Amino acid sequence: MAKTTKKSDKAKAAPADSPFDAKFLAQQREVLLAERARYVKSADALKAEADSLMSEREPGDVQFDEESGEGDSLAVERERDLALSAQARAAVELIDAALVRLDAGTYGICIHSGQPIPEERLEAIPWATERVEFKTGSFRN
């Protein structure tokens, strides 16, 4: 009789060719999911704030004061919120890609050298795709 593998058993095992143990990979998955939730919440809040600023603004509404100087401070604040929201969404995409790599068994492998990324780097930046020496350009052509 063939032994069936439960999904929880499968999640506990590290891919055979992974340089990382199952416990480390499980911890990284938890961190990635928590970071993803945080970035999604931030992106949504910033977008809502930008939309709110736009709805509060009346056509031709321009503020002139000592703090903002000449110009439309609501438009500047809205653009800032939209830019920060876009950055948060970009981080979510990087995190999603890291989760895909976790599922594929390629998480923590440098995209340039094929060598493992040190655990310390992955703990600092869980979605990292390259070793520090490649990120800084030391080994790039």
Image: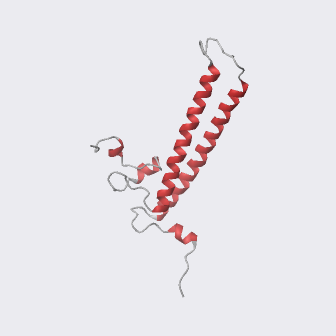
Query: Percent x, y for residue 124?
Result: 46, 47
Query: Percent x, y for residue 14?
Result: 46, 66
Q: Quadrant of the N terminus?
A: bottom right
The residue drawn where x is 57% and y is 48% is 36
Left or right of 58 on screen, residue 80 = left
Query: Percent x, y for residue 111?
Result: 37, 52
Q: What colouring method underlies this structural image?
A: secondary structure
Residue nearest the observer in this picture, 62 or 33: 62
Position above or below: 3 against 88: below
Left or right of 129 on screen, residue 89 = right
Position above or below: 65 against 125: above
Query: Percent x, y for residue 114?
Result: 34, 56
The residue drawn where x is 58% and y is 37% is 85
Position above or below: 98 against 2: above
Q: Quadrant of the C terminus?
A: top left
Left or right of 35 on screen, residue 122 = left
Res. 119 image quadrant: bottom left
Residue nearest the observer in this picture, 41 or 93: 93
Position above or below: 72 against 103: above
The residue drawn where x is 56% and y is 32% is 83
